[in-house]
Image: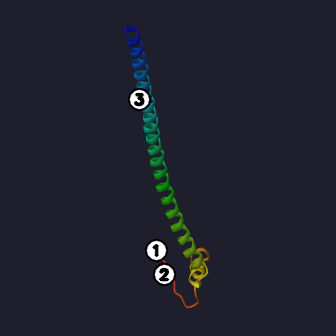
Amino acid sequence: MPARTKLQRADRRRSRLGAWAIILIVLAVFGASAIGGLRLKQKNFAYQTREETLMELIEAEERRAEEMDELEAYTKTKKYIEDVAKEKLGLVYEDEVIFKSRE
């Protein structure tokens, strides 16, 4: 009978070692997935920040495009031609009177 108890003890040790090995493997997999999840959250935060920055740039460029469209429409008007003629060339209408200060 003592031989049987030694075999039984050896079997118990093997089964305990197997159980501990399984537990360690499960914990390692859990730890690896937790670390991977944290890395993904960090990347997601970085991507969200980048997306917000790009959206702001898009809005700024859209406003700039609108301003350019308005300027293009203004440059095609008679008012623009008159303003440029007055400012750059100093031209005036025949019936227009110009007053200059003495300063």
Q: Residue at x 51, y 83 (%)?
A: 98
What residue appears at the point 37 percent right and 10 percent down from the top-left corner?
A: 1
Please state which of the two labelled residues, at mark 1 or mark 3, is closer to the viewer. Answer: 3
Q: Residue furthest front?
A: 1
Give the number of the disc on residue 102: 1
Is the C terminus in the top left, top right, bottom left or bottom right quadrant?
A: bottom left
Label 1 Cα neighbours within 10 Å, binned few <14 / some 14-19 / many ≥20: few
Measured in 3D between alpha carbons, the distance from the residue under mark 1 to the one under mark 3, in whole angstroms, is 97 Å
Sequence order check: which comes first, mark 1 or mark 3?
3
Q: Residue at x 47, y 48 (%)?
A: 44
Which amino acid lies under the numbered mark 2 shown in the image of this protein? Phe
Within 10 Å of the Cα at label 3, are there few (<14), some (14-19), or many (20+) other Cα atoms? few
> In front of the other: label 1 or label 2?
2
Q: Residues within 10 Å of mark 2 (few under 14, many from 20)?
A: few
Residue 68 is situated, as x and y percent measured from the top left of the image, at 57, 71
The percent coordinates of residue 99 (x first, y second) are 48, 81
Q: Mark 1 belongs to which amino acid?
A: Arg
Residue under circle 2?
99
- The Cα atoms of the two marked residues, 1 and 2, are separated by 10 Å
- Residue placed most toward the observer, 18 or 67: 18
- Mark 2–mark 3 Cα distance, whole angstroms, equals 96 Å
Q: Can you identify the residue that label 3 sits on?
A: 23
